[in-house]
Image (cartoon, coloured by chain):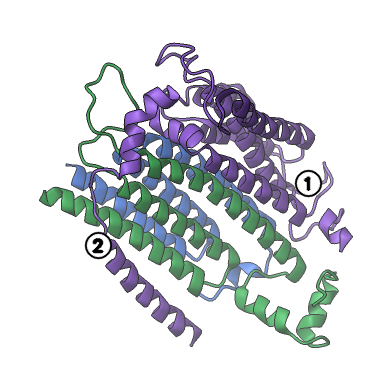
Chain colours: A green, B blue, C purple
Amino acid sequence: MNELLSIGNLLYGGAAGLIVIGLFAVVARRHLIRVLLGVAVIEAGVNLMLVAAGFRPGAAAPIFDPQAISGPMVDPIPQALVLTAIVIGVAVLALGLTLAIRIHRQYGTLDTVALTRIVNAPAGSPESRAMMQRGGGGHES
Amino acid sequence: MMVWVVAILVSLMLIGAFLVVAIPDLLGAVAASTAVSLALSVLFVVLRAPDVAMAEAAVGAGLAGVLFALALRKTESRRTRDEEAS
Amino acid sequence: MRQFASLLFLFGFAFFLSVLVGGLPFGAAPMQVGQAIVEQNIEATGAANAVTGVLLAFRGMDTLGELTILFVAATAAGMVVERRKHGVSRDSVAGFILLAGAELMFPFLLILGAYVILHGHLTPGGGFQGGAILAAAFFVPFLANPGRAFQGHAMAFVEAFAGATFILLGIFSIFREGDFMAPMFLGTGEFGQLVSAGSLPLLYLALGLKVGAELGSLVAEIAAAPGSDDPLIEEPQAAKDL
């Protein structure tokens, strides 16, 4: 029983650690691609937490085997959820990466602080002019 | 027995996640994130979720790494590499 | 100041998360829904793999919504990214070993992907995993030789055809079984054989082709995007309309 408790603590603690580390990359790092990597790490943590919640010690994988003695099985619902979440996650990450590529072409940088400065710059200031010189034009606001 | 397997895999994952945040080189960070996905997929096998493990190994460790590496290649220029404050 | 605020937020979030996680039960018996699905899966779907049963029969609507999200993400990525003309890639062709290896791996990856998709109701695997393998089969040669043309039209056709097949199978089951996305043709075929579990293998085949085409076209979109030094050749459609 003690062993079971420590497995649960390890899994939940690992999932929470992944979420916190990924969140650190999102809020404290400045490069946009590093932010997206942080989002990927958060996704990994959430997926681990869901699958760990459906785990049952001593149970078999949720695949029926006519020859085997029918014992308890782990919960298949979190696994199905996580399966779709993984594929959705990579599609959304790819969308974010195309946006990052587009931003880099438009503004020439992926540093979030520099991007905030450029976007908030009043028209006619040096930053705004430098952006227009890069052939911006799509920037209307 | 299972405690030790889980402990090793979880610590590998956390080390990988720390490297994703901490490595200055972004390509190294992408490699660390695929290492996180790989350790996670082995952990899914230990947790009796072979379907999820296959998806994580194929999509998380393979496809996502390729996507990140391609995007890095498309956005690298002489200036951006060192702009990030570390 | 910004760093300090974000660190404070992180510590607060970590504390919140640890309190939340500390109260979670671990290793408990599945909830009622999970228990019911494990017990009824074979009679209701005929699939040995309970995850497949949940994905395609019990929660088939969720999978349809998931396909919609995938489609929207791929479409949006195609609208955002700029195109570069074929054959003007600055990326050099890979070496001989990578080129030959990519060509050599192509049929084996196709066979592996088809195997994983078609055995989704019997063994671990299925449309999502096999679709990712199929996408890998198509983009590995593309990565080895970036200048070659990517069959975007064929990809779009496969994607549209597979998506339409998935929905048509669901609509057809309204007339046959009375419910949208209900499994059909149960009882044809013996449990555990390749031809069993009714319409689930067909649904998984459509799903796998669609996922493979979407993921492959996402990789192709990013690979075909111009680098930061390439001249702009073609504006994306969305930018022209503005």
> Disc 2 residue type?
Gly
Query: Where residue C52 appears, x then y in whole percent?
Result: 45, 31
Residue occupying image coordinates x 47% and y 67%: A25
Disc 2 packing (10 Å; few <14; some 14–19; many ≥20):
few
Residue behind mark 1:
C89
Would you place residue A31 above or below residue C136 in this image?
below
Badge 1 sits on which subunit? C
Q: Describe residue C33's horizontal placement relative to residue C223 as left or right.
A: left
> Disc 1 residue type?
Ser
Badge 2 sits on which subunit? C
Mark found first going from the N terminus, 2 or 1: 2
Residue occupying image coordinates x 33% and y 71%: C16
Image quadrant in which you'd find residue B5 = top left
Query: Where residue A80 appears, x then y in whole percent?
Result: 44, 40
Residue behind mark 2:
C23
Q: Nearer the viewer, residue A21 or C174?
A: C174
Same chain assignment for discs 2 and 1: yes
Q: Secondary structure at mark 1?
A: loop
Image quadrant in which you'd find residue A108 = bottom right
